[in-house]
Amino acid sequence: MALPRLTGALRSFSNVTKQEDYSEESADITDKRSTLQEQLCNSDLTWKKIVTFVDENTSKEQQQSVHGDLRTLFHAAKQIVGSENGEEAIESGASFLFKMLYAKDCIGRD
């Protein structure tokens, strides 16, 4: 005789039911992400503020790694904007890249 499956036993002997509609939860998460994105886009975030925040809120062990990542982001912005446009334009591009990539978990070609 075959033993009953765990999910079947749970449904039979408890009040657990299969939920079909998860849109309510995903809509809540989508709303939170969109409000966070709006706050980031509307803020006066500059490259100097980002670097100052990192300096003030990271430990000495983490600062070297984080500064390396920020340097990589700055050089990417420099390549995108162009080095002939000046430091202010490059810093603006770097802060834009930071804002754009801040809430992302993964970057790729999916």
Image: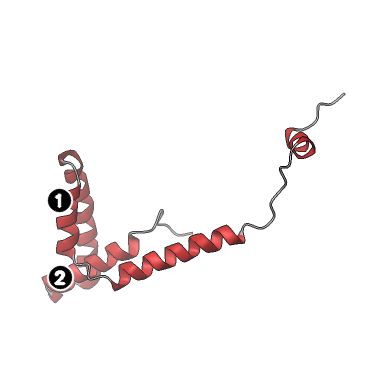
Question: Which labelled disc corresponds to residue 21?
Answer: none
Q: Which mark lies nearer to you, 2 or 1?
A: 1
Question: Which labelled disc corresponds to residue 83?
Answer: 2
Residue lying at 84% horizontally and 26% vertically, measured from the top left: 2
Please tell me whether mark 2 sits on a helix, a strand or a loop. Answer: helix
- In this view, the residue in front, 80 or 102, is 102
- In this view, the residue in front, 20 or 69, is 20
Percent across and percent down for residue 11 are 76, 40
Percent across and percent down for residue 34 are 43, 67
Where residue 41 sits, quadrant-wise, is: bottom left
Residue lying at 72% horizontally and 46% vertically, measured from the top left: 17
* Mark 2 touches mark 1? (CB < 8 Å): no
Q: Residue furthest front?
A: 15
Depicted 42 relative to depicted 50: above or below: below
The amino acid type found where label 2 is placed reads Ser
Q: Pick the quarter of the image with the N terminus.
A: top right
- At label 1, counting other C-alpha atoms closer than 10 Å, the crowd grade (few under 14, some 14-19, many 20 or more) is some
Where residue 84 sits, quadrant-wise, is: bottom left
The amino acid type found where label 1 is placed reads Asp
Q: Residue furthest bottom?
A: 85
Please tell me whether mark 1 sits on a helix, a strand or a loop. Answer: helix
**Sooner in the amino-acid sequence: mark 2 or mark 1:** 1
- At label 2, counting other C-alpha atoms closer than 10 Å, the crowd grade (few under 14, some 14-19, many 20 or more) is few
Depicted 84 relative to depicted 5: above or below: below
Percent across and percent down for residue 18 are 71, 48
Residue lying at 24% horizontally and 59% vertically, measured from the top left: 73
Label 2 to label 1: alpha-carbon separation: 26 Å
Question: Which labelled disc corresponds to residue 55?
Answer: 1
Depicted 25 relative to depicted 83: above or below: above
